[in-house]
Structures are given as C-alpha cells and as structure tokens.
C-alpha cells in the first residue's frame, strides 16, 4: 500500500515562503493498495492537486475514488469543489463520514457549493457520487481495503480510520484533543476549564473508553498519521480548541505498538524551521519513552510504502 | 490613502514554491484613508495575516475599529473571515458592508460559514467583537471611515460581484474584483464608477487566451482589465485575482502583457502593476 500526502496543514491553507517545504495546503492523504484501490482521507485544499493528476491521466472518465471524511470542518472539505474528477462524467466517487442526528452528509456538502458561496452547485457535478453515513465504530470493506473506525475527541466530533490492505495498516487520527481534560461533543466551549476543576466521572469514563478505542485502532499499525497541531504551550493556552501535542501521539503509538508515526495537521503559524525543531524534539523525547518508533513530520509530496505494493 | 495587498489570488489559496513571489492567499486588500481609519476590501485568506498585524496595535487591546467591504460571498472573498483574529477581541468594532437583499440576509450568509458542521466557533455571536452588518444599496453613496463609497454590481458568471469606488480628499480608489463583462465590455454604470480613478484594482484572472477559453466562468482577462482602464481613463491599473494555477513566471508574463496591451490600445499614459502579496501602494 502506498500513502501520499497532498495536504498536511490544519485550520486554513497558508501560502508563503515560510511554509514552502512542509506545504501550506490543508488535510488530504491518499492511500492506494497494490491492486489499485484508491482511498482518500479528507478533502482539504491538497485534494486539488490529486484531482489534477487524476483528471490528466488514463483514468479520466472512469476513475473511482473513495473519500473518507474525518469531520466536516472547512480544512477537511474545502478542496472538494476544486476536485476535477467530480466534474467528469463516468467517474465514481463514494463519500463516507460519521452519521449525525442533525444533518444529512449530502446536505453538508451541497451547502458548500450552494449560491452565494460557489458558482457551480453540487448537483451539476457530472461524476456519480454516493454518500455513506457511518456509525461510530463502523467496519466495512472498500474493494480489497478493510476499514475500521472509532470516534475522536474534537468539537462536533471527528472519526479516526484504520485502513488495512496488502498485509499492512495505516491509521489516520485527525482531528483530536488528548483524552484527559475536556470531553468534546457538539457544544461550543468558550474557554479552558478553570484550574483544578475536576471532570465529571462519566466524562472521564467516556474519554477513557475513547482513548482505548484509539489505541485498539492503532494496534500494531505500520503508520499512524496523528493530529499534532499543538505545542505544550498551545495546549496550556487553548486546550478547548481540540488538538493534540506530539507527545500525545507518541504515547498512543507506544501503547499500541505502532511502528511509525507521522506528525500531521501542522498549525498554520508553524514555519518550516519550527516543524523541523518539533520533529527533532519529538524524536529525542521518544527515544526514551517509545524506543523503536520511527517518527516523521508529514510534508506535501511525502510518499510512504507499507506492506506489499 | 495607503493600500496594502494581503491576498491577490482567485478561487482557492495556492500554496507552494511556484507562487511565493506574488503570493497564494485569496483576495484581501487594506486601505488606510486620510482619516487614519481602516477599510478592508474582501476577506479571503489574506485577511489572516492582516489580522495578525493589526493585533500589534489598537485591535490587540480591544480598541480597534474598522469597516469591511465585501464584493460578494464566494469562498475566496470570505474564507479568511473566521481566521481574522481582531474579530475575537472584545471591544473591537467592525462594520460590515456587502451586497444582499437585506442586512439580515447578509448576516445569514456570514453565519453560514461559521455553522458548527464547518467551524468550531459555531456562530458570529461567539466571536467577541461588536459586529454590525449592513446591506449596500446599489449606486447610492454612503460613508465609510470618512470616505465616500459607491457600489455597482458587475456581472460575475451566474452571480454578481460589487465593485467599490472609494473617494477620500479628492483621491479615488476603485476595487473591481471578479468581473465577467461578456463580449460588449463593461456596462456603462461600471465605467461611470471607475471613471478617472487614481487607482483601479481590477480582476485580471486570466491571460487573453484563457479568458476566451473560460469565458463562461465570469472573470476578466488582462485584456478585459486593460479595456476597462482605457475606457474609464483611470491613471493606474492594478492587476488582481490571478488564477490559482498560474505560477510566478506566468504572472510576470501576464503583467508584461498588460503593459503591451495598454501601449497598443491607447493607454500609454496609464500605469500598470501586478498586485503582490505584502506590497503597499500610496495614492
């Protein structure tokens, strides 16, 4: 299975000289099994370039794309209106995301391209598009790729995906806060919890189970792609924004016995030099707590081979 | 008046080494009139960097006030709004003007972007600053930061986009992003709005060739921008809103093309520059 990173940034795209190396496009990762099944996780602005590649090659007009959406915050869906294969008759696209009580998945995407926000309405896309709403712990197959899910700790709730094919597994864990200080559901949280405030026992229990779910999903994985948007200082200041630190990701990978971790969803303000430094610090710290864990910082254009391909 | 360009790109932000010189952020221009107030023209992703800069001054203390003019609500003109940090500082005041049938409809359009399925802040009401939202009456002058402003709606594909004429102590800046005039060129009302401007910031998404190829998309080519500048006898033309797929070398060529077309078509006396992210221009 081959993994390609098309967008590694969180919040919003950040063009400019300071983000040139890691890249400024928002979240999008492509996985392709040896037999050619293509699964894309998230549709941030990075998906535009993947779309150009698909529209330009031999697959045009008969491409098949399976798109897993972690959650529908802008930085995970804003590239889709610019995904060229959507506008090509003959192509097929299947979109998967968590089922919600309040909104149909299709409506969330249709609104994105509705007047007055975008010139081409969703129903004018020429590809055959189907939507699949998933329960929290869904397990299903996409051709030869097995998919498993678990819910994450993020405002309005996100989903983590494990993809298994060719004897290898890749897990996508973005976006999520650690499972310790705040339980995120659908409500808006205006400020961090006050110092010394105890979490209600039922929230603690729910977070404990959620973390166990994530560890199980990452168990023995060949590659874990993890939301590490926050530094320690960020987390102290704005824990209620719902993102993790590199140390949180290392702990999960160590407990789950994963072999490789990709730091992902870099903060928009993070310069290339700062990501370099975070990577170096994370490796140094992990050398003591997670021996044998290989750590990389995801960058646009990075390709990783896992298992047979 | 001082203009500063924070985002000059159209459609979708275009990060990467190929766009570093002109910049990859979507539409946002700031204008400081002689009153020393602040007018923000559109809120593409460029607005994020403007906001960070503003927080170093009065806006960081909750004592800032500014007016935002929105040409239309396509994503590349509003997607920086949720990331414009001064909006989160209680005490700051913002007056937002844009085209819509009513002020509450304009508010609804901005709320749509903040909704919980798309953005964690969930509503404008959670942002902190005081925000008032006013729908613009087409053609009628109104005051913004002690400048006189008029707006006209340009054709823009199936939608429209407002162009703004901003007059301050006898100087005139016109912002006309996203204009797709069709074969007959700019409507008379648009030319009247642009007439004699010291600076015309004009949609110049495409080369003349791409402009003909994508005529139905509702954008101007550099040729259309030059045509408008000559017909309205403006003093300086600023090319703006480049296609997301053009690299820096291609934008260089687009700007050189603008100069040549002006020279060939009777606009030798009109100055032309390509908008560059981070650049300032004094009027």
Image (spheres, coloured by chain):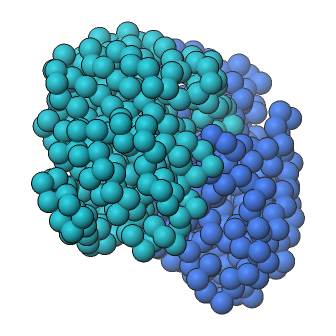
Chain colours: A blue, B cyan
The x, y position of residue B190, in whole percent, is 41, 40
Quadrant of the drawing holding the N terminus of chain A: bottom right
Residue at horizontal 17 percent and vertical 33 percent from the top: B2
Examine the rendering and report whether any part of residue A263 can be seen.
Answer: no
Quadrant of the drawing holding the C terminus of chain A: bottom right
The x, y position of residue B265, in whole percent, is 24, 64
Q: Nearer the viewer, residue A302 or B161?
A: B161
Q: Is residue A41 left or right of residue A240?
A: right
Q: How many numbered marks does the figure carry? A: 0
Q: Nearer the viewer, residue B48 or A123?
A: A123
Q: Is residue A170 left or right of residue B66?
A: right
The x, y position of residue A15, in whole percent, is 36, 55
Say which quarter of the image contains residue B56. top left
Residue at horizontal 47 percent and vertical 15 percent from the top: B131
Q: Nearer the viewer, residue A225 or A49?
A: A49
Q: Is residue A272 left or right of residue B206?
A: left
Compared with residue B76, is residue A309 higher up or lower down, i.e. above or below?
Answer: below
The x, y position of residue A72, in whole percent, is 67, 45
Examine the rendering and report whether any part of residue B30 can be seen.
Answer: yes
Say which quarter of the image contains residue B188. top left
Residue at horizontal 85 percent and vertical 51 percent from the top: A133
Compared with residue B277, is residue A54 higher up or lower down, i.e. above or below?
Answer: below
């Amino acid at each position: 299975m081959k993994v390609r990173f098309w967008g590694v940034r969180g919040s919003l795209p950040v063009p400019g000289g300071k983000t040139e190396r890691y890249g400024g496009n928002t979240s999008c990762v492509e996985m392709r099994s040896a037999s050619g099944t293509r699964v894309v996780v998230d549709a941030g602005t990075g998906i535009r370039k993947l779309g150009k590649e698909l529209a330009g090659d031999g697959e045009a007009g008969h491409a098949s794309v399976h798109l897993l959406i972690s959650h529908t915050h802008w930085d995970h869906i804003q590239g889709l209106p610019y995904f060229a294969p959507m506008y090509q008759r003959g192509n097929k696209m299947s979109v998967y995301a968590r089922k919600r009580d309040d909104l149909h998945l299709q409506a969330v995407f249709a609104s994105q391209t509705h007047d007055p926000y975008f010139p081409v309405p969703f129903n004018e896309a020429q590809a055959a598009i189907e939507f699949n709403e998933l329960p929290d712990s869904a397990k299903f197959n996409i051709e030869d790729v097995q998919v498993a899910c678990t819910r994450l700790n993020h405002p309005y709730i996100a989903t983590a995906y494990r993809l298994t094919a060719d004897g290898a597994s890749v897990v996508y864990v973005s976006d999520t806060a650690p499972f310790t200080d705040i339980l995120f559901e659908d409500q808006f949280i205006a400020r961090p919890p006050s110092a010394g405030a105890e979490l209600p026992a039922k929230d603690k229990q729910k977070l404990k189970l959620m973390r166990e779910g994530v560890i199980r999903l990452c168990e023995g994985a060949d590659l874990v792609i993890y939301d590490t948007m926050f530094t320690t200082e960020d987390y102290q200041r704005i824990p209620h924004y719902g993102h993790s630190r590199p140390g949180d990701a290392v702990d999960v990978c160590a407990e789950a016995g994963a072999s490789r971790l990709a730091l992902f969803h870099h903060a928009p303000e993070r310069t290339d030099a700062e990501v370099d430094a975070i990577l170096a610090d994370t490796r140094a710290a992990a050398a003591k707590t997670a021996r044998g864990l290989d750590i990389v910082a995801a960058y646009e254009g990075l390709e990783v081979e896992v298992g047979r391909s | 008046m001082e203009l500063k360009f924070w985002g000059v790109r159209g459609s979708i932000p275009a990060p990467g080494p190929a766009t570093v010189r002109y910049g990859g952020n979507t539409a946002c221009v700031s204008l400081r009139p002689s009153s020393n107030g602040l007018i923000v023209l559109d809120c593409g992703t460029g607005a994020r960097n403007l906001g960070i800069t503003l927080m170093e001054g009065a806006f960081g203390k909750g004592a800032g006030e500014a007016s935002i003019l929105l040409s239309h609500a396509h994503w590349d003109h509003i997607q920086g709004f949720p990331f414009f940090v001064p909006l989160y500082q209680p005490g700051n005041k913002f007056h937002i003007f844009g085209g819509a049938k009513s002020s509450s409809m304009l508010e609804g359009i901005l709320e749509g972007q903040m909704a919980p399925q798309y953005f964690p802040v969930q509503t404008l009401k959670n942002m902190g600053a005081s925000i008032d939202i006013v729908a613009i009456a087409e053609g009628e002058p109104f005051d913004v930061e002690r400048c006189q402003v008029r707006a006209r709606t340009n054709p823009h594909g199936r939608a429209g986009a407002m162009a703004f004429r901003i007059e301050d102590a006898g100087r005139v800046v016109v912002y006309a992003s996203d204009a797709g005039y069709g074969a007959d060129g700019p409507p008379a009302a648009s030319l009247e709005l642009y007439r004699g401007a010291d600076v015309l910031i004009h949609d110049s998404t495409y080369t003349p060739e791409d402009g003909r190829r994508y005529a139905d998309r509702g954008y101007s080519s550099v040729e259309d921008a030059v045509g408008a500048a000559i017909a309205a006898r403006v003093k300086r033309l600023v090319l703006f809103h480049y296609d997301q797929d053009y690299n820096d070398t291609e934008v260089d060529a687009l700007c050189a093309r603008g100069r040549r077309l002006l020279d060939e078509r009777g606009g030798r006396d009109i100055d032309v520059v390509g908008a560059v992210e981070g650049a300032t221009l004094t009027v």
